[in-house]
Structures are given as C-alpha cells and as structure tokens.
C-alpha cells in the first residue's frame, strides 16, 4: 500500500484532482471492477480479516511485505483505512501505463476523513492494489 518515487508523485498529483473527479465520464468496466476490489479490501479490514485483505494486494506488495508486516503497515500508517466506517469512490483515472487510479473518500472510526488514491494493476486478469496515498480531507465532508 506504500508508494514512493515517480508513481507516488503521480498519485499525489491525482489527489489534487480528486475534488473534480465526480465530473468525469461514467466509469468503464475496468474502473468498476477495480473499485470493487478496493471496497472488498476495506470490508476485509473492517472485519479484521488481514489474510483476505492481503489477498487483494499486488505481487509487488507481496514481495515487499509479508502478511504480518502488511497488517502493521496498514494499522499504523493508514488508521482511517484500517478501520473505516464509510467509503465512497469519487472517480478514477487511467495512467499512461494502463494502471488505474481509484479516487476515494474514506472516514475512519477515529472520526478523521481522508482522500485516497489507490494505484491498481492488472495481474492475471484481476485488478490488484499496488499502493495508496492519502491526505486529510480539507472539508471533512465524508
């Protein structure tokens, strides 16, 4: 779920566009499928089912984190995502390399809202989560 470097900069730049994402064209089938994966992972986190949540991660995430380190990283680095009470997809954007960036608003059980950009990659015909960047919601209307 951690992204650094050039892709992280792209994802951070997409956060700026999150407010206008709802004005985009209706999502295509890929965007809908990728969004479902994100929502399923959030549901797994809500159930404290980190085995299932880890299953939605990309091969790159699996190479970087074992299951226990993944759970620690999510709980400590993304508390709103680890314990969300509300999440909505605001749109998506396809990158030049075919990746999808799913724009989300998430409210955590801690009462804090974040904007999130999920980087999605297609692996063996399935969308997988390859990273996420978040920032606090400026308007707190999640």
Image: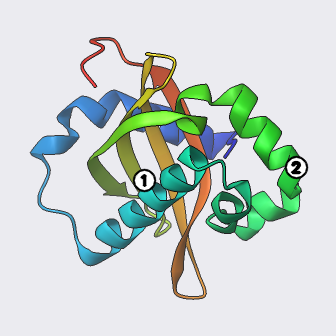
Residue depicted at x 52% and y 30%: 134
Q: What mark, if any, has residue 91 been given in the picture?
A: none
Looking at the picture, does residue 43 appear above or below residue 57? above
Looking at the picture, does residue 84 appear above or below residue 101? above
Q: Nearer the viewer, residue 55 or 23?
A: 55
> Which label's residue is closer to the chain start, 1 or 2?
2
Q: Nearer the viewer, residue 142 or 43?
A: 43
* Marks 1 & 2, CB-CB < 8 Å contact: no
How dense is the environment of label 1, judged by Cα within 10 Å: few (below 14), some, or many (20 and up)?
Answer: many
Cα separation between marks 1 and 2: 26 Å
Q: Is disc 2 placed on a helix, strand or loop?
A: helix
Q: Nearer the viewer, mark 1 or mark 2?
A: 2
Residue 112: % across, % down: 45, 16
Quadrant hosting residue 77:
top right
Residue 106: % across, % down: 40, 33
Q: Say how many tags the image has.
A: 2
Q: Which residue is mark 1?
A: 101
Q: Nearer the viewer, residue 133 or 109?
A: 109
Query: Left or right: where does residue 11 sit relative to residue 91?
Result: right
How dense is the environment of label 2, judged by Cα within 10 Å: few (below 14), some, or many (20 and up)?
Answer: few
Residue depicted at x 49% and y 25%: 109
Q: Which residue is mark 2?
A: 68
Q: Is disc 1 placed on a helix, strand or loop?
A: strand
Residue that sits furthest to the bottom in the current view:
124
* Quadrant location of the C terminus in the rendered image: top left
Query: Left or right: where does residue 14 sit relative to residue 123?
Result: left
Is residue 100 something one can see in this rendering? Answer: no
């Amino acid at each position: 779920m951690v992204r650094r470097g050039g892709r992280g900069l792209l994802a951070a730049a997409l956060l700026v566009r999150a407010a206008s994402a709802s004005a985009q064209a209706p999502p295509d089938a890929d965007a809908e499928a990728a969004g479902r994966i994100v929502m399923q992972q959030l549901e797994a986190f809500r159930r404290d089912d980190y085995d299932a949540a880890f299953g939605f991660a990309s091969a790159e995430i699996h190479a970087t984190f074992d299951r226990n380190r993944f759970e620690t990283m999510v709980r400590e680095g993304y508390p709103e995502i680890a314990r969300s009470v509300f999440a909505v997809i605001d749109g998506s954007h396809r990158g030049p390399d075919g990746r999808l960036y799913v724009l989300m608003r998430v409210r955590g059980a801690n009462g804090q809202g974040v904007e999130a950009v999920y980087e999605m990659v297609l692996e063996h015909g399935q969308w997988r989560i390859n990273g996420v960047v978040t920032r606090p919601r400026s308007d707190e209307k999640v």
